[in-house]
């Protein structure tokens, strides 16, 4: 029992002190959640591009199997096509294959994959596997921690499945998409770390981009965000993304807020 308690405290301390500023709001870091932990999230996204405001809710469960492997299971619900309904779901896995650790800094590299399904008709050229499209995605993530600053970049490639029964005449039918991001996170509080019960306050700035290789259309979004971590187990995110440049029309995520609450349970997997 004492050994389990010690391991739990070590995991909680690492989660708070070492990785707080790596818990990006719009992207995933190369670092993983603590071993044998379970996380539960609820995310709400609101979009302002349509004549009427629309929103999406994403319940999510995360599993940290070991220090290198974790998995997410998501469901997507929205009112984008009329009444609020279940759109589909997604499975996401990430494997960390490189770790270089030094005092107050580290470098991580990971590979990720996602498979998603959605009942939505395709209306835009953008491939979004978190609710709008069915498809698969793979890529790599590189994250560098430098004391209180964390920098991360992601490169991904997505392929949308062909949905003949839901394709509409005259609407774009995207097939493939390159995605890329550059994220930064800074630990503002605590100024001096004393124990794992201290609240953490982080600020983020993320650049999120995609390119359709078939048409050459692309976009780049800017996404500032803030985050609070309470008792090392509860996380609250608030962010907003808006387009800074691009020529890809009809996007749902062009002007979107994100509000998320997350709860973590350490040593929940035996």
Image (tube, helix red, strand yellow):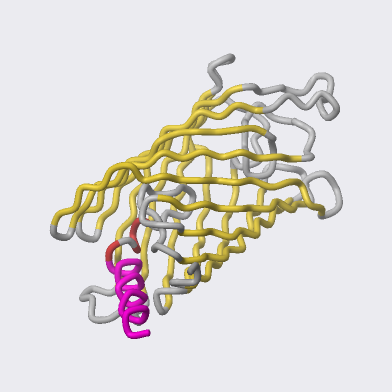
Q: Nearer the viewer, residue 27 or 207?
A: 27
Say whether residue 24 is visible: yes
Q: As drawn, which residue projects farthest toward the left?
A: 103
Residue situated furthest bottom in the rendering: 2
For the N terminus, the image quarter is: bottom left
Is 164 colored magenta in this rendering? no
The x, y position of residue 264, in whole percent, is 49, 70
Residue for point 39% across, 55% down = 32
Image point (30%, 59%), residue name: 186
Asked whether, in this view, residue 40 is left or right of residue 58, the answer is: left
Magenta residue check for 4 = yes
Residue 245 visible somewhere in the drawing = no
The answer to whether 58 appears left or right of 98 in the picture is right
Residue 147, given in percent of the width and then of the height, sits at 20, 59
Quick check: 81 above or below 123?
Answer: below
Residue 61 horizontal side relative to residue 7, left or right = right
Residue at point 64% right, 35% down? 251
Position in image of residue 229 (x %, y %): 42, 71
State the residue at coordinates (20%, 47%).
Answer: 100
Magenta stretch mostly in which secondary structure? helix
Up the image or down, 194 lies above or below 90; here it is below
Label tally: 0
Q: Is residue 163 above or below residue 128?
A: above
Q: Quadrant of residue 128?
A: top right
Q: Which residues are magenta?
A: 1-17
| Residue 158 rendering spot, x and y as whole percentages | 56, 29
Name which quarter of the figure residue 137 lies in.
Answer: top right
Q: Front-most of 186 and 39?
A: 39
Which residue is situated farthest in the top direction here?
214
């Amino acid at each position: 029992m004492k050994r389990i308690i010690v391991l739990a405290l070590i995991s909680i301390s690492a989660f708070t002190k070492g990785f707080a500023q790596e818990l990006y709001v719009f992207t995933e870091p190369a670092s993983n959640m603590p071993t044998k932990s379970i996380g539960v999230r609820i995310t709400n996204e609101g979009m302002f591009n349509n004549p009427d405001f629309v929103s999406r809710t994403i319940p999510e469960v995360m599993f940290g199997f070991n220090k290198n492997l974790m998995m997410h299971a998501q469901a997507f619900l929205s009112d984008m096509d009329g009444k609020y309904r279940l759109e589909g779901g997604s499975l996401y896995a990430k494997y960390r294959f490189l770790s270089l650790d030094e005092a107050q800094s580290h470098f991580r590299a990971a590979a990720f994959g996602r498979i998603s399904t959605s009942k939505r008709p395709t209306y835009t050229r953008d491939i979004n596997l978190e609710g709008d499209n069915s498809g698969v995605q793979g890529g790599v993530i590189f994250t560098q921690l430098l004391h209180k600053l964390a920098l991360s970049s992601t490169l991904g490639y997505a392929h949308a499945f062909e949905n003949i029964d839901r394709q509409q005449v005259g609407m774009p039918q995207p097939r493939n998409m390159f995605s890329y991001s550059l994220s930064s996170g800074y630990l503002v509080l605590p100024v001096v770390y004393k124990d794992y019960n201290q609240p953490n306050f982080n600020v983020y700035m993320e650049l999120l981009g995609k390119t359709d290789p078939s048409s050459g259309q692309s976009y780049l979004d800017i996404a500032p965000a803030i985050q609070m971590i309470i008792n090392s187990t509860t996380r609250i995110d608030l962010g907003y993304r808006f387009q800074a440049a691009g020529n890809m029309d009809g996007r749902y995520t062009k002007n979107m807020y994100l509000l998320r609450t997350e709860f973590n349970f350490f040593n929940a997997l035996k």
